[in-house]
Image (cartoon, rainbow, N blue to C red):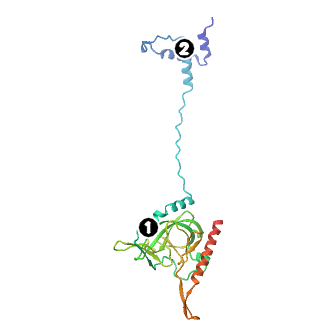
Amino acid sequence: MPNKIEDALLAIDMPEQQLTAAIRRGVDEAPAPQRWPKWPLIPITAATAVGLAAGIYVAAQHPAQEQPAPVTRTKQRQTPTLAQRVAAVKAGAAKKNAAYYGQASKTVQTSSEATISTGPEPKNVSELISLTDAAVTGIVTQLSARPYNKFPFTIATVLITRVLAGKTVRPGMTIRVQFSGGNLTNVGGETITYTAAGNRLPKVGDELAMALGKMPKGANGDSQPFWAGYGQDSIFFKDADGQYRLTPQPKSYGYNSKTGKQEPDNSIEERQTKLNREMNALIQEHTAN
């Protein structure tokens, strides 16, 4: 009669000494009868011992591998595009404008000018740009009052959307641009909004085309550097029809020796019309490129 236990032992591929030790461990580690006094005792046969030994040997040869820790992925915050930044500015413009201009009790006109030139006005856009440090388009994102020597000035933070000329600026950067007029609080605590003749006060959300010069720290009492337009005909506001236009200057009058009368001088209006046309053509050229 064949010996089934012996055959089972021979079927296990392991050294004899290790097999013998495994069988002994299997027998020694078998549950003691006194731990389960109410259960029937199960005798440990040679075949059971062989199975235990085989299991112990396989476990020893193939230890459980440690599972790698789960990878936690951090969601990176995406930087908004220039178009998204512009849209966000427009969405919050009304609230910011109400906060800045809404505190004034009245509006009066003043004559202060935030410009870098008192010379003759340029005859065309090319000449205008040649006299400045940069020409850009942008959108007003914030306003702050910066009075100097009891004269009102406004600093508009402008997000640049397009560079028309200049190597020190780039789309996406913000610059501080000074405008004539704005809020001024008197000794009695009353806030008044002053507007300068021929100068339009900026509002958050306004889109502008500007030919600017950079002013150093300390100019007009400002503790930081800023930019300013070259003369009155250097900042163009985008109107509802999509065209950029200068703020119309007050019409002047001159004496006509032929008629002996004071007559309107149309030269300012004609120059502004020409500058408007050339600036829009320049912007269109850069937009196409």
Q: Is residue 78 above or below residue 163?
A: above
Callouts 2 and 1 close, C-beta under 8 Å:
no
For residue 48, which numbered disc appears in the image? Answer: 2
The residue type indicated by label 1 comes to Tyr
Expressed as whole percent of the image width and height from the top left, the position of residue 70 reads: 53, 38
Expressed as whole percent of the image width and height from the top left, the position of residue 82 reads: 56, 60
Q: Where is residue 241, by image quadrant? A: bottom right
User: Looking at the image, which is closer to me, 187 or 222?
Assistant: 187
Kind of element beneath mark 1: helix
Expressed as whole percent of the image width and height from the top left, the position of residue 76 reads: 53, 50
- Asked if residue 105 shows in the view, the reply is yes
Residue drawn at point x = 57 percent, y = 60 percent: 83
Q: Where is residue 247, by image quadrant? A: bottom right
Local crowd at mark 1 within 10 Å, few (<14), some, or many (≥20)? some
Local crowd at mark 2 within 10 Å, few (<14), some, or many (≥20)? some
For residue 100, which numbered disc appears in the image? Answer: 1
User: Looking at the image, which is closer to me, 177 or 58?
Assistant: 177
Q: Is residue 265 above or below residue 101?
A: below
For residue 279, which numbered disc appears in the image? Answer: none
User: Looking at the image, which is closer to me, 36 or 46?
Assistant: 36
User: Looking at the image, which is closer to me, 277 or 173?
Assistant: 277
